[in-house]
């Protein structure tokens, strides 16, 4: 079998629209993420960031427009089909399994088609035991990568919010994604945890991971991302490097306003 490699952008949104009744939450938005690119999505409250993120992750299909991933049209593909295609996401309110260990939670990311159905206790056959050993090994590697290998055996509920976010990233990475989508990864983190997260994302970027980040923390976005899409009232008003968007008058007027001085780079 020949595998055709797609040389185009990894993710492409084309004239995407999302209406809720009479409200146009996302208004004709287009942007791309290239392989290895880290893209931020920012904008003031109600700008349409979460709705756009939901469209990319497949929470709901757009009213109109198209979304392509790896050259495949995914516009109307439901969320659960996207992980096997190479898309993985983290959640702002981390959705990990209470009662399971940190390691088991990471292992859950490896079974996107059966998130509830492959608990270690039912892995009885020799083949399944082999798979389980392999999955533990991979999960340990990922925990090591996010700096939490020493917590592997602990129950997930003993971790801090900052640590949970890292476990959630490890869980998302466990599926071996081409695109990692992070929903407000710095929300609720203290300064040290935010710095730790930023280092982790920088390391992932160095390894070539493509990412989409929705985040309120402007400083975090500006330092973590190669390019940033700025939305306001559902419309994309800028798309460029952090330096470019922070100089953009429309962005300053619409979004940054009085904080313009804070983000001058
Ligand atoms: N399920 C929904 N039904 C109706 N309106 C919605 C729905 N989801 C979002 N909206 C509206 O769409 C607009 C965009 O909301 P969205 O949450 O995408 O913005 P946001 O940029 O993520 O804002 P925030 O920074 O406050 O999270 C808002 O006016 C919001 O009230």
Image (cartoon, rainbow, N blue to C red):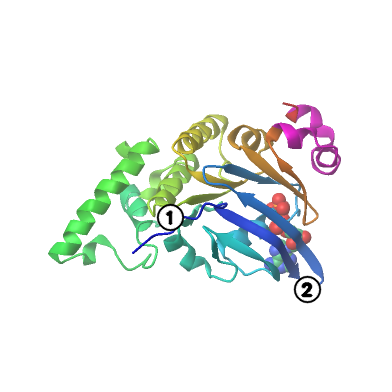
Q: Are marks 2 and 1 in contact (CB under 8 Å)?
A: no
Q: Residue at x 36, y 68 (%)?
A: 114
Q: Quadrant of residue 115?
A: bottom left
The single residue placed furthest to the front in the displayed view is 2
Can you say which quadrant of the picture contains the C terminus?
top right
Q: Quadrant holding ligand 1?
A: bottom right
Q: Position of residue 152 (x, y in %)?
A: 30, 43
Residue 11: % across, % down: 58, 55
Element under disc 2: loop
Percent coordinates x, y for residue 4 in the rendering: 44, 59
Q: Residue at the location (57% across, 51% down)? A: 9
Residue 187 shows in this picture: no
- Please identify the quadrant where the N terminus is shown: bottom left
Kindly identify which numbered label has been placed on residue 15. none
Circle on res. 21: 2
Foreground pick, 206 / 106: 206
Magenta residues (range): 243-262
Which residue is label 1 attached to? 96
Of residue 92 and residue 128, the one placed in the foreground of this image is 128
Residue 171 sits inside the magenta stretch: no
Could you tell me which residue is drawn at 61 percent across and 38 percent down? 225
């Amino acid at each position: 079998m020949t595998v055709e490699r797609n040389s185009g952008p990894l993710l492409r949104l084309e004239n995407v629209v999302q209406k809720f009744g009479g409200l146009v939450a996302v208004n004709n938005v287009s942007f791309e993420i290239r392989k290895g690119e880290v893209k931020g999505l920012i904008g003031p409250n109600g700008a349409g960031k979460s709705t756009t993120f939901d469209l990319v992750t497949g929470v709901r299909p757009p009213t109109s427009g198209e979304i392509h991933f790896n050259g495949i049209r995914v516009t109307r593909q439901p969320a659960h089909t996207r992980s096997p295609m190479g898309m993985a996401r983290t959640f702002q309110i981390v959705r990990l399994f209470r009662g399971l260990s940190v390691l088991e939670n990471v292992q859950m990311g490896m079974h996107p088609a059966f998130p509830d159905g492959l608990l270690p206790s039912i892995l009885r056959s020799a083949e399944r035991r082999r798979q389980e050993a392999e999955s533990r090994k991979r999960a340990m590697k990922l925990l090591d990568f996010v700096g939490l290998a020493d917590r592997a055996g602990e129950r997930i509920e003993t971790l801090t919010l900052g640590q949970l976010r890292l476990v959630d990233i490890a869980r998302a990475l466990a599926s071996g994604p081409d695109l990692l989508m992070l929903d407000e990864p710095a929300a609720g983190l203290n300064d040290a945890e935010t710095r730790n997260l930023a280092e982790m994302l920088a390391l992932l970027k160095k390894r070539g991971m493509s990412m989409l980040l929705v985040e309120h923390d402007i400083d975090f976005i500006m330092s973590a991302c190669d390019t940033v899409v700025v939305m306001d009232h559902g419309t994309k008003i800028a798309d460029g490097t952090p330096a470019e968007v922070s100089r953009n008058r429309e962005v300053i007027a619409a979004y940054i306003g009085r904080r313009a001085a804070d983000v001058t780079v």
